[in-house]
Image (cartoon, rainbow, N blue to C red):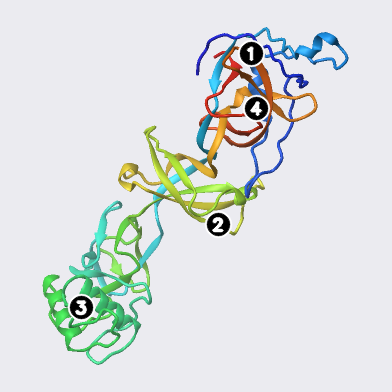
């Protein structure tokens, strides 16, 4: 923005007054920003505007009295975004409880922060591994052996194929039957894990967990104590990164799934993200406010590091206007009869006021969408000097 000082003189006879709090009309699905921001900026710049007297001959020139230094900015065209800034928490998706089924003595446990993949031991009982198998339909509840059918058998077949103990051309991952192919694939798994190769899966030897891998967040079991079937041994989450925001319930309509966001990490660096879900159930807080949970998926999860439950700032894009004219917010002048205008400087140096309608405010860029007869890209408009 140029800081060249220019006199604020106009040939337009439109009456103008010092800016006042005049709210703009609603626009679009989410509404326009309040004009109070505009008023504050302009007033703070020290601009004074004389009211033109309609019956004063001298007023025909529409001269604008301005004792403050001014500069010039240009009318530009492009895409604007309205944003809301919120506090958020960076962590991992989901919460899982690993409920043991095996009896014996707990001989080995993972540590908080460990990442365990499918086909690996979750913990050990009597020095034998309890195997992690992916399953989203039903938990382990019975021994599985040749001739059985069911959703749990289908989960076992899918896990054996995913772990490459069976070929999907020979054993369908969608099959719910425990046959010869399941038997031999299970034998290979048991051999790999150092277990007795029975071709039968006893209850407790494996647990079905609804994830590809888990990150351990809490260990409840104690090494050397009895493994009690039905008790929680450890807790975990997925390894997918997520930011959650407790948004005021009245702002629910301001945010929709798919909105783009900018996440500011504790390090000060920023990374892009996208709203993955907007809560529909309000939760009442201790201060009597109500909030909904907004979940955000980082687009570059590696950039977020490994911090869990870390505070972050989230700038959510709540509306977008494409291919529109815009000017700096502090270029707006409030008209005496209501509405706004821009003081345009023509190529010959003359000044005139162009009444404008305001649209979307891009707070991050400090600009506002404007529409007005005679307004064009590249025109110079007067702004307070910086």
**How packed is label 2: few (under 14 Cα within 10 Å), some, or many (20 or more)?**
some
- For the C terminus, the quadrant is top right
| Residue, disc 1 | 350
Distance, label 1 to label 3, CA atoms, is 79 Å
**How packed is label 3: few (under 14 Cα within 10 Å), some, or many (20 or more)?**
some
Q: Secondary structure at mark 1?
A: loop
Q: Residue furthest right?
A: 55
Q: Which corner quadrant of the image does residue 25 belong to?
A: top right
Sequence-first disc among 2 and 4: 4
Q: Secondary structure at mark 4?
A: helix
| Residue, disc 4 | 38
In this view, the mark in front (2 or 4): 4
In this view, the mark in front (3 or 4): 4
Distance, label 4 to label 1, CA atoms, is 25 Å
Q: Nearer the viewer, residue 198 or 325?
A: 325
Q: What is the x, y in percent for residue 110?
A: 25, 57
Q: Nearer the viewer, residue 342 or 215?
A: 342
Q: Which mark is residue 168?
A: 3
Q: Secondary structure at mark 2?
A: loop
Q: Nearer the viewer, residue 27 or 76?
A: 76
In this view, the mark in front (1 or 2): 1
Q: Tell me, yes or no, whether the two marked residues, 3 and 4, touch with CB atoms within 8 Å.
A: no
Q: Residue furthest bottom?
A: 147
**How packed is label 4: few (under 14 Cα within 10 Å), some, or many (20 or more)?**
many
| Residue, disc 2 | 279
Q: What is the x, y in percent for residue 215?
A: 31, 56
Q: Is residue 78 above or below residue 98?
A: above
Q: Is residue 62 left or right of residue 384?
A: right
């Amino acid at each position: 923005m140029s800081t060249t000082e220019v006199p604020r003189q106009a040939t337009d006879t439109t009456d103008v007054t010092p800016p006042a709090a005049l709210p703009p009309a609603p626009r679009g699905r989410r509404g326009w920003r309040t004009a109070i921001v505009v008023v504050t900026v302009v007033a703070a710049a020290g601009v004074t505007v004389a009211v033109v007297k309609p019956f004063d001959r001298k007023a025909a020139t529409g001269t604008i009295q301005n004792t403050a230094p001014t500069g010039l900015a240009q009318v530009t065209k492009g895409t604007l975004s309205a944003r809301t800034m919120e506090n958020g928490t960076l962590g991992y998706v989901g919460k899982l409880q690993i409920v043991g089924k095996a009896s014996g003595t707990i001989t080995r446990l993972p540590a908080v922060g460990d990442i365990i993949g499918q086909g690996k031991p979750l913990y050990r009982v009597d020095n034998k591994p309890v195997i992690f198998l992916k399953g989203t339909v039903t938990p382990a509840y019975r021994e599985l052996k040749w001739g059985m059918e069911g959703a749990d058998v289908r989960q076992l077949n899918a896990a054996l194929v995913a772990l490459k103990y069976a070929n999907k051309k020979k054993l369908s991952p969608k099959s719910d039957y425990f046959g010869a192919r399941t038997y031999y694939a299970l034998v290979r798994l048991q051999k790999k894990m150092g277990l007795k190769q029975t071709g039968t899966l006893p209850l407790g030897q494996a647990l079905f967990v609804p994830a590809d891998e888990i990150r351990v967040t809490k260990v409840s079991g104690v090494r050397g104590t009895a493994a009690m079937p039905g008790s929680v041994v450890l807790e975990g989450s997925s390894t997918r990164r997520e930011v959650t925001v407790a948004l005021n319930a009245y702002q629910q309509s301001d945010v929709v799934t798919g909105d783009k966001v900018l996440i500011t990490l504790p390090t000060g660096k920023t990374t892009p993200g996208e709203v993955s879900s907007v809560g529909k159930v309000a939760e009442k807080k201790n201060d009597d406010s109500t909030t909904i949970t907004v979940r955000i998926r980082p687009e570059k999860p590696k950039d977020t590091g490994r911090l869990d439950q870390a505070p972050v700032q989230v700038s959510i894009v709540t509306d977008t206007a494409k291919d529109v004219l815009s000017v700096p917010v502090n270029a707006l002048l409030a008209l005496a009869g209501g509405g706004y205008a821009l003081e345009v400087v023509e190529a010959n140096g003359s000044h005139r006021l162009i009444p404008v309608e305001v649209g979307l405010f891009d707070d991050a860029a400090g600009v506002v969408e404007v529409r007005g007869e005679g307004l064009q890209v590249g025109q110079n408009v007067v702004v307070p000097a910086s």
